[in-house]
Image (cartoon, rainbow, N blue to C red):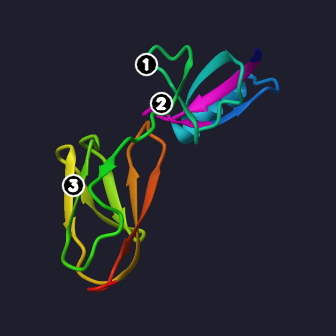
Amino acid sequence: MTLYHIFYDEDKNIAWSSTAGVTEGIIEEQAAEHDYGYAAIECSEIPIGEKFYINDEEDDIVEKTLFDPTFSTTNPEIDEVIDVENVPAGTEVFLDSVSVGIMEDTTLTFTSTEAGLFTVVLKKDKYYDYMQEIIVKRFGE
């Protein structure tokens, strides 16, 4: 276990961490300029923001959650409906890098209207980003 000095935002997302000495001046500067909180925590892994966040008690790190969606199909034909279930409410959905909205419930439904390769990305605070490619076939393919 290694002692890490961790700076995090108001949502407990880790901004940066260090094993080097951190002075009161650095802690005060990070709070004043970035509104970062501070915690000194012993960790067995490097506490990076892409993988961890700070718990509510601000005394430990927590690994982000994996999405576990279920797609009715990832190879639909044109005009076929695709249902995606088991997506947490509050998830932002991206289609080919463009946000199409934030989920209010746990099921996403969309229709494949043109052939091609499309990428669906799911993003939610405290979750790893999730990516799924959808290949829409032309009629008869």
Q: Pointer 3: residues within 10 angstroms few (<14), some, or many (20+)?
A: some
Residue pointed to by mark 3: 108
- Given residues 61 and 38, the one toward you in this image is 61
Magenta stretch, overall SS: strand
**Left or right: residue 113 compared with residue 99:** left
Quarter of the view holding residue 15: top right
Q: From the viewer's perspective, is residue 39 above or below residue 15?
A: above
Image marks 1 and 2: residues in contact by CB distance under 8 Å: yes
Q: Residue at x 18, y 77 (%)?
A: 79
Quarter of the view holding residue 5: top right
Give the spatial CA distance, label 1 vs label 2: 8 Å
Q: Position of residue 27 (x, y in %)?
A: 65, 27
Image marks 3 and 2: residues in contact by CB distance under 8 Å: no
Give the spatial CA distance, label 3 vs label 1: 30 Å
- Please provide the residue range marked out in magenta: 3-15
Image marks 3 and 1: residues in contact by CB distance under 8 Å: no
Quarter holding the C terminus is bottom left
Residue pointed to by mark 2: 12
Query: Disc 2 on helix, strand or loop?
Result: loop
Residue pointed to by mark 1: 56
**Left or right: residue 70 compared with residue 33:** left
Disc 1 residue type (three-letter):
Asp
Q: Position of residue 4 (x, y in %)?
A: 72, 22
